[in-house]
Image (cartoon, helix red, strand yellow):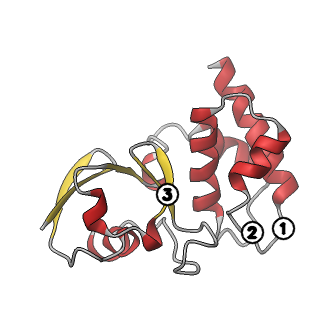
Amino acid sequence: MVRIEVNGRAFDVDVDDDTPLLWVLRDHLGLTGTKFGCGVAQCGACTVHVDGAARRSCVLPIATIAGAKVTTIEALATPNQLHAVQEAWLAENVPQCGYCQAGQIMSAVALLAANPAPSDDDIDSALSANLCRCGTYPRIRRAVHRAAAALKRA
């Protein structure tokens, strides 16, 4: 049994210690916003925050994060308000197929928490491990800048 906090709620999950966090989120907690892409931490579709840091959940054994605070895409918005990054994503028309978007957004939120005024190079570096088959990288960069400006105003 492993205890983790996900999106502000504590859960005891009865899984093998080496079960990846991704499968705990999707199969045991029903949180399907975090996507399976490659299974080897190369695409970023499975990105979540663990104690505030962007992490690839597909290769993160549940036992290594016992007691940690996990945040998924489902917890970014409130019922009445999207997160500034989500709003910027929509304003810049970033999503096409949408499969990578949860991971992209989670990486962008972590970047802006660490660097509230990132340069293009900062954005490219922080999000370079998040692959987008549709190639919306210029829009992603614009959305991160838009979200940074919105967060600065707030």
Image quadrant for the N terminus? Answer: bottom left
As drawn, the label of residue 132 is 2
> How far, Cα to Cα, is label 1 from label 3?
22 Å
Q: Report the residue at 44% width, 72% height from top.
A: 59
Mark 1 vs mark 3: in front: 3
* Label pair 2/1, CB-CB below 8 angstroms: yes
Where is residue 94 drawn, in percent x and y? 77, 56
Mark 2 vs mark 3: in front: 3
* Label pair 1/3, CB-CB below 8 angstroms: no
Number of residues whose C-alpha sits closer than 10 Å to that of mark 3, classed few (under 14), some (14–19) or many (20 or more): many
Q: Which residue is mark 1?
A: 135
In the image shown, does 70 or 42 lie closer to the viewer? 42
Q: Amino acid at mark 1?
A: Gly
Where is residue 105 drawn, in percent x and y? 62, 52
- Residue placed farthest to the front in the image? 64
Count of numbered circles on the image: 3
Judged left or right of residue 65, residue 85 is: right
Q: Amino acid at mark 3?
A: Arg
Q: Amino acid at mark 2?
A: Cys
In the image shown, does 111 or 11 lie closer to the viewer? 111
As drawn, the label of residue 55 is 3
Image quadrant for the C terminus? Answer: top right
Q: Report the residue at 44% width, 55% height from top.
A: 72
Where is residue 97 drawn, in percent x and y? 72, 73
Number of residues whose C-alpha sits closer than 10 Å to that of mark 1, classed few (under 14), some (14–19) or many (20 or more): few
In the image shown, does 87 or 52 lie closer to the viewer? 52
Judged left or right of residue 51, residue 137 is: right
As drawn, the label of residue 98 is none
> How far, Cα to Cα, is label 2 from label 3?
17 Å
15 shown above or below 52: below
Judged left or right of residue 38, residue 79 is: left
